[in-house]
Image: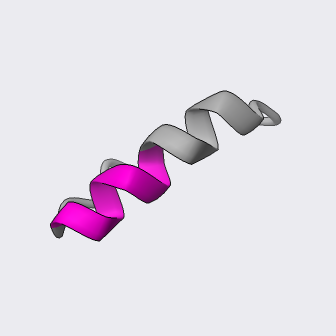
Amino acid sequence: MGSTKQMRCWRRLQDSGSTPT
C-alpha cells in the first residue's frame, strides 16, 4: 500500500481482465 510501481502492475493486470486482491 503506497507503491506506485505495484499499482502500475495491478493496472496492467486489470487491463488483461485480472484483479489481484
Q: List x then y, in percent, for residue 1.
A: 73, 35
Looking at this view, is 2 or 17 the one in front? 17
Position above or below: 3 against 13: above
Is 12 within the magenta?
A: yes
The secondary structure that most of the magenta stretch takes on is helix
Report the residue at 57% width, 44% height from top: 8
Q: Residue furthest left?
A: 17
Q: Residue furthest right?
A: 2
Question: For this view, does 6 lie left or right of residue 4?
Answer: left
Figure quadrant of residue 15: bottom left
Image: magenta residue range: 10-16
Report the residue at 19% width, 63% height from top: 16
Is 11 within the magenta?
A: yes
Q: List x then y, in percent, for residue 19.
A: 30, 60
- What color scheme is it? one colour
Report the residue at 75% width, 37% height from top: 4
| Total residue callouts | 0
Position above or below: 18 against 8: below
Figure quadrant of residue 2: top right
Report the residue at 33% width, 64% height from top: 14
Question: For this view, does 8 lie left or right of residue 14?
Answer: right
Question: For this view, does 4 lie left or right of residue 13?
Answer: right
Question: For this view, does 10 lie left or right of residue 19?
Answer: right
